[in-house]
Amino acid sequence: MASLGVRPVLPPPLTSISDPPPLFDGTTRLYISYSRPYAQRVWIARNYKGLQDKINLVPINLQDGPAWYKEKVYPENKVPSLEHNGKVLGESLDLIKYVDANFEGTPLFPSDPAKKEFGEQLISHVDTFSKDLFVSLKGDAVQQASPAFEYLENALGKFDDGPFLLGQFSLVDIAYIPFVERFQIVFAEVFKHDITEGRPKLATWFEELNKLNAYTETRVDPQEIVDLFKKRFLPQQ
């Protein structure tokens, strides 16, 4: 099982006995859970744009979360959420676009019209993509998940000016990688199947993503992913 790279020291998750930060004091805060793929999306975007000093990371323990988070921050009681300019916003796909549009740093969406159009197509498909992967666990997982991974392999061949989904790294890669990361690990460890076999573009995508500190700093411990999937989705394994 692949090991994690060097990671920065991360703050411990806040629990039911943790005091709140000084809410709505002008500080921008990204509330996440380290293990949640939706939160990972916004965390990657923050890192890639170099906003570590502009957006504070506030991890929440969702199994023993502080009451003030739901009461005073985000009534949905989910992560991620972003406290910015006196308001709190949610939904990970909306947030990665919001962070890209409202903060300085490397743009995460291209200006090229063809890439923008294809990028929007890919983003509109990502929920179906992840749902298909989870559904595959109920049957012959390797066979049933194959069309989803083929979709990604084909999408990676659309542009030839880089190894990512729109050629250059973008919020489209950010939308997909948390789920592909988890299923790559689960399929390798549980089903002894390499999802990049016969998919060279997908293999290169992983290689290039793993060169980006903005992403690798957010990766979850592989064993934690396997244990979670076995408990929640694969009790027979």
Image: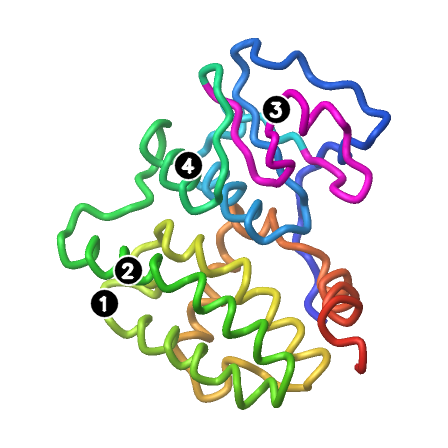
- Reading the image, the residue beneath label 1 is 159
Give the residues in magenta.
Answer: 59-84
Q: Is residue 106 left or right of residue 68?
A: left
Q: Position of residue 171 (x, y in %)?
A: 37, 49
Q: CA distance from mark 4 to mark 2?
A: 17 Å
**Gap between marks 1 and 2 measured at Cα:** 6 Å
Circle nearer the N terminus (2, 3) = 3
Look at mark 2 in the image and give the residue it sits on: 166
Q: Position of residue 224 (x, y in %)?
A: 76, 60
Under circle 3, the secondary element is helix
Residue 4 location, x and y as percent? 68, 57
Q: Is residue 115 left or right of residue 201?
A: left
* Disc assigned to residue 49: 4
Q: State the residue at coordinates (50%, 42%).
A: 42
Quadrant, the C terminus: bottom right
**Secondary element type, mark 1:** loop
Position above or below: 4 against 235: above
Amino acid tagged 4 = Lys
Residue 115 versus residue 229 in the image, above or below: above
Q: Amino acid type of disc 1?
A: Phe
Tell me, yes or no, whether the two marked residues, 1 and 2, touch with CB atoms within 8 Å.
yes
Q: Secondary structure at mark 4?
A: loop
Quarter holding residue 192 = bottom right
Alpha carbon separation for disc pair 3 and 4: 25 Å
Tell me what residue is drawn at x 83 percent, y 30 percent.
16
